[in-house]
């Protein structure tokens, strides 16, 4: 390893954790238990993305009883309800207080680079840190993943990102094209359409599931049958599993199932994946039927695995009997084109997902797709760890309740790494 | 014979395909293929097309032999009908692509196929190609594919194979999504 140009005076610490969200705080909890000296650097305030980058009506996709962090859990009166984002932010902030986490807020990391053979240099807006290990816990959802074809959308149409969107009244009157059919796309489509702005929803591959099944929240069953705990080493194609979009769920007081049939019945117009913009016309893929068929079949397979689990565990008395839901209705001729110059569409909402921002990461660990090379969170650079990515170590990795197991595993690896390094240093001396 | 000893054989070498997938993940430049066809106008509405060479795995490749195809139009179009219409060739391409995908997916999932037949139907209003009504598109209004499949699997498993073959089909993608087409011409 070569050191970078000129070294400014820096504070020294064993571990720098970047990001004070649920991941960084949980890691801090385990580091503290192992008496590892560390600091958490946070660009904004604790739980910043929860406070700044979510829309008003958003609630967690998981019920309150699943909202837990190491040594800390929801203890309110409504275990089966879903936390609003403000409550999530307060929950995470409460956790920071509870763990007395060493958080430095308002400190933005501008670079992480190799300092020497055994240390990294973390450059920030408030001085440098030199550390033996780094935990990247800055989140998987930093930058919107907007398709390139957005550049061809006529300028008269306003383009909106979910992290800027607060509520439908902020949008111009008139039609809205929502692009993307994961949890975000469906929730925004329903809310915007209900505000009197007719929504067209562009639907690519998606994950359909009912909110409740056989008397319980679907997350309860996914937890019971072991789906949430499924380990990244046991999945046939982990790269594909990590790309699976978030399920079409909404957290709501009425525990409603939000699916394409529901939106269709409300008058939302479905189209295939937005495949191109040509001559001011949005072109949609003719694959809508197949992506719906794929999602219906996949949902039925999951429900069957739940039914099988109930049968073999003698839990049939737990609630209502097995059920299957109507296939997604796609009987109308598919909408293939939409004139973006007619004035019908006034707004495009890009619910096309997010990607992490690693622009500050000056250590060569990115693959050709710009993703960090890692093995279950152990980054391809000694002493570097990453957290909070979809299916990092388990299917639940990107959920709040999934943080604990990942943080425990990775903190163990980190502590062993620091110990081995200390041993080697002593031997060398 | 013990049931577990029955080997599934749809005639698709899935190990080779999975090996190729792994190799091309590591060396994505080798995955850059170029497909080619050449054609000569014969006369009337008849064209003779030849397919032989293509590029892939970093070098020029060749089919075992050159394949020849004749396209023409039916007699009700005042043509000689020496071959199928080009639009029917599109259906041929789609069914060929989906069929290959069905066999490969079934093989990968350990499902024996006994028979797979498909009928394809594509309504078209020829007012479009005749320039009668500019609101009518030239191409198909839609394409309907009907599969009849006999396989050692449940109805859901068969449906999942067909859905997956559409998801991974090149021709399905070409038909359902826009493609940038350049046509250059040179006077000779």
Image: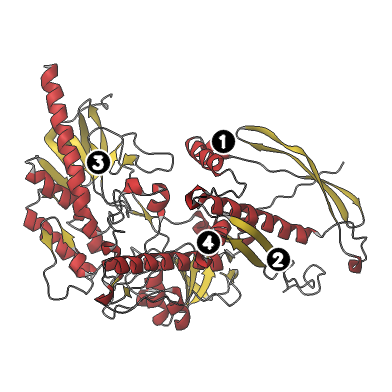
Give the labeled residue for mark 2.
B120
User: Label 4's element?
Assistant: loop
* Labels 2 and 1 in the same subunit: yes
CB contact under 8 Å: marks 2 and 3: no
Q: Quadrant of the C terminus of chain A?
A: top left
Residue A225 appearing in the image: yes
Q: Which residue is mark 3?
A: A385
Q: Residues within 10 Å of mark 4 (few under 14, many from 20)?
A: some
Placement of A15 over or under B173, stated as above or below? above
- Pair 2/1: label in front: 2
* Location of mark 4 (residue): B153
The residue closer to the viewer here, A260 or B96, is B96
Nearer to me, B16 or A292: B16
- Left or right of A414: which side holds A201? right
Asked whether, in this view, residue A316 is left or right of residue A292, the answer is left
Residue shown at the point (14%, 60%) measured from the top left: A93
**Which is closer to the viewer, label 2 or label 3?**
2
Residue B43 x %, y %: 93, 53
Work out how far the residue at label 4 is from the one at label 3, CA to CA, in angstroms: 44 Å
Marks 3 and 1 sit apart, C-alpha to C-alpha, by: 32 Å
Nearer the N terminus, badge 4 or badge 1? 1
């Amino acid at each position: 390893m070569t050191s970078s140009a000129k070294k400014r005076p820096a504070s020294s610490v064993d571990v720098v954790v970047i990001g004070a969200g649920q991941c960084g705080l949980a890691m801090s909890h385990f580091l503290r238990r192992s008496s590892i000296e560390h600091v958490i650097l946070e660009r904004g305030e604790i739980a910043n993305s929860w406070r700044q980058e979510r829309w008003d009506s958003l609630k967690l996709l998981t019920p309150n009883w699943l909202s837990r962090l190491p040594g800390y859990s929801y203890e309110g009166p409504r275990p089966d309800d879903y936390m609003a984002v403000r409550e999530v932010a307060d929950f995470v902030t409460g956790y920071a207080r509870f763990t007395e986490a060493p958080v430095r807020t308002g400190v933005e990391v501008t670079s992480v680079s190799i300092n020497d053979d055994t240390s990294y240099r973390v450059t920030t807006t408030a001085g440098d840190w030199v550390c033996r290990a780094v935990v990247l816990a800055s989140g998987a959802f930093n930058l919107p993943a907007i398709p390139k074809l957005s550049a061809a959308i006529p300028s008269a149409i306003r383009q909106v990102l979910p992290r800027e969107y607060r509520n439908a009244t902020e949008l111009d009157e008139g039609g809205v094209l929502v692009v993307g059919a994961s949890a975000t796309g469906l929730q925004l489509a329903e809310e915007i359409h209900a505000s009197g702005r007719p929504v067209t929803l562009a639907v690519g591959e998606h994950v359909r599931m009912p909110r409740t099944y056989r008397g319980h929240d679907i997350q309860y069953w996914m937890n019971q049958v072991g789906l949430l705990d499924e380990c990244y080493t046991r999945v046939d194609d982990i790269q594909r599993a990590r790309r699976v979009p978030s399920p079409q769920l909404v957290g709501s007081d009425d525990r409603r199932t939000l699916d394409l049939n529901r939106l269709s019945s409300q008058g939302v117009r479905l189209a295939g994946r937005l495949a191109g913009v040509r001559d001011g016309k949005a072109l949609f893929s003719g694959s809508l039927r197949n992506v719906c068929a794929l999602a219906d079949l996949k949902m039925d397979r999951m429900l069957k695995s739940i039914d099988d689990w109930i049968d073999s565990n003698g839990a049939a008395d737990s609630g209502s009997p097995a059920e299957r839901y109507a296939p997604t209705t796609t009987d109308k001729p598919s909408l293939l084109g939409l004139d973006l110059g007619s004035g019908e569409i006034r707004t495009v909402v890009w619910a096309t997902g997010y990607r992490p921002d690693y622009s500050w990461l000056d250590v060569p660990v990115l693959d050709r797709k710009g993703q960090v090379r890692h093995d279950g969170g152990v980054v391809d650079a000694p002493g570097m760890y990453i957290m909070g990515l979809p299916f990092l170590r388990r299917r639940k990795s990107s959920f709040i309740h999934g943080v604990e197991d990942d943080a425990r595993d990775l903190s163990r690896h980190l502590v062993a790494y620091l110990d081995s390094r200390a041993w080697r240093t002593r031997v060398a001396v | 014979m013990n049931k577990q000893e029955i080997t599934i054989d749809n005639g698709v070498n899935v190990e080779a395909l999975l090996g190729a997938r792994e190799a091309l993940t590591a060396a994505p430049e080798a995955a850059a293929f170029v497909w080619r066809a050449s054609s000569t106008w014969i006369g009337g509405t008849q064209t003779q097309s030849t397919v032989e060479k293509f590029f892939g795995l970093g070098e020029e490749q060749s089919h075992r032999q050159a394949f020849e195809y004749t396209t023409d139009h039916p007699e009700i179009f005042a043509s000689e009908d020496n071959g199928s219409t080009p639009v029917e060739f599109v259906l041929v391409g789609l069914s060929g692509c989906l069929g290959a995908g069905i066999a490969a997916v079934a093989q990968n999932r350990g499902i024996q196929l006994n028979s797979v037949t498909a009928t394809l139907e594509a309504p078209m209003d020829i007012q479009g190609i005749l320039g009668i009504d500019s609101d009518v598109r030239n191409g198909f209004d839609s394409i309907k594919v009907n599969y009849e499949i006999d396989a050692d699997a449940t109805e859901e498993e068969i449906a999942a194979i067909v859905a997956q073959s559409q998801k991974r089909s090149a021709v399905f993608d070409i038909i359902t999504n826009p493609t940038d087409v350049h046509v250059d011409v040179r006077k000779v």
